[in-house]
Amino acid sequence: MTIVTLDNFEKEVMQAETPVVVDFWASWCGPCMMLAPVMEALEPEVPGVKFCKVNVDDERDLAMEFQIESIPTLLCVKGGKTVSRPAAADVTPGQMLKKTTFWLYYVWAIAVSAAGLALISQASGVVWEASADQTAASVATIVGLISICNAVGRVLFGGMYDKYGRSLSMQLVNGLFILTSAVLLLAMSRGSVAVVILGFVLGGLAYSGVTPTNSAFCRAYFGPGHYPVNFPLINTNLIFASFGSTVSGALYDAGGSYNSTFFLIIGLAAVGIVCSLAISAIDKKGN
């Protein structure tokens, strides 16, 4: 397959004498890796058609020009005009629910969302335990840092998924939750509000990665055609994740320590790591 860039797109695609199929792809995209060997095997079987590929990470201008909203996307060009652009990954809700990758991701989303909700539900108590001298206003301000970092982090994680892909984005969320718990365990042992603040900043950033990753994963793996239904289905993970608050509260009632919440978060992040690795294994097998 011919590798196409902005510099040679006009010559290789628009001025080609034969019809051209252009595959818009990225190295981090699991479905792209699954499609690649199919396209390579098809090329010699269709001698009257030229096959090209465009890496959207390297050629963002081309991706924007042709309004590539999800990958893989196939662009069919004949005589310098686009004649078709079928979505290579366009999965119905019913088909999505039958895919192992969906359920692995769904469990990941439940685990990390539960971790975030567990942290938020116990945040005020964590501040009070670290320093009983805090006023109600200062406690509310400190806890509010989680929401602030959640908002800022969503933008950062959206850009990260675009640039580095699913695996790194998911594992960063997992890692940040583990780091959050480690910092807060240290804060409790030292009775330090400053360290609590650092933990809340990290926790807010960790939790912020869930929503943009949900959206990006849904479009990348299941396509844009049924996105309005598929994305809300993924977000139903919050029904189950909400019990993270309940469990963390019960653990505190049983042990009288917020450390149990932090260990719960570590356990949930560990589940997230396993799910992410399992999706990577399926992507690799598909390739």
Image: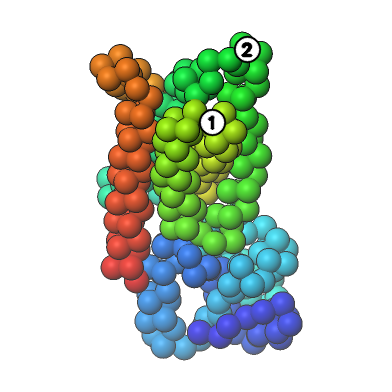
The type of residue carrying mark 2 is: Thr
Q: Residue furthest top?
A: 136
Q: Which residue is mark 2?
A: 135
Where residue 2 sits in the image (x, y, percent)? Answer: 56, 85
Q: Residue at x 63, y 48 (%)?
A: 156
Query: Image point 55% across, 54% down: which residue?
Result: 161
- Residue 268 shows up from this direction: no
**Mark 2 Cα-neighbour bin, 10 Å: few <14, some 14–19, many ≥20:** few
Nearer the observer, 49 or 244:
244
In the foreground, 31 or 145 = 145
What separation in Å lies between label 2 and label 1 (alpha carbons)?
Answer: 15 Å
As drawn, the label of residue 192 is 1
Mark 1 nearby-residue class (10 Å; few <14, some 14–19, many ≥20)? some
Give the x, y percent position of residue 214.
Answer: 48, 42
Query: For residue 96, what is the image quadrant?
Result: top left
Residue type at numbered disc 1: Ser
Q: Check disc 1 and report its element: helix, strand or loop.
A: loop
Say which label, 2 or 1, has the lower sequence index. 2
Q: Position of residue 144 (x, y in %)?
A: 62, 24
Q: Establish if 56 lies above or below 6.
A: above
What residue appears at the point 56 percent right and 68 percent down from the top-left corner? 24
Residue situated furthest front in the rendering: 190
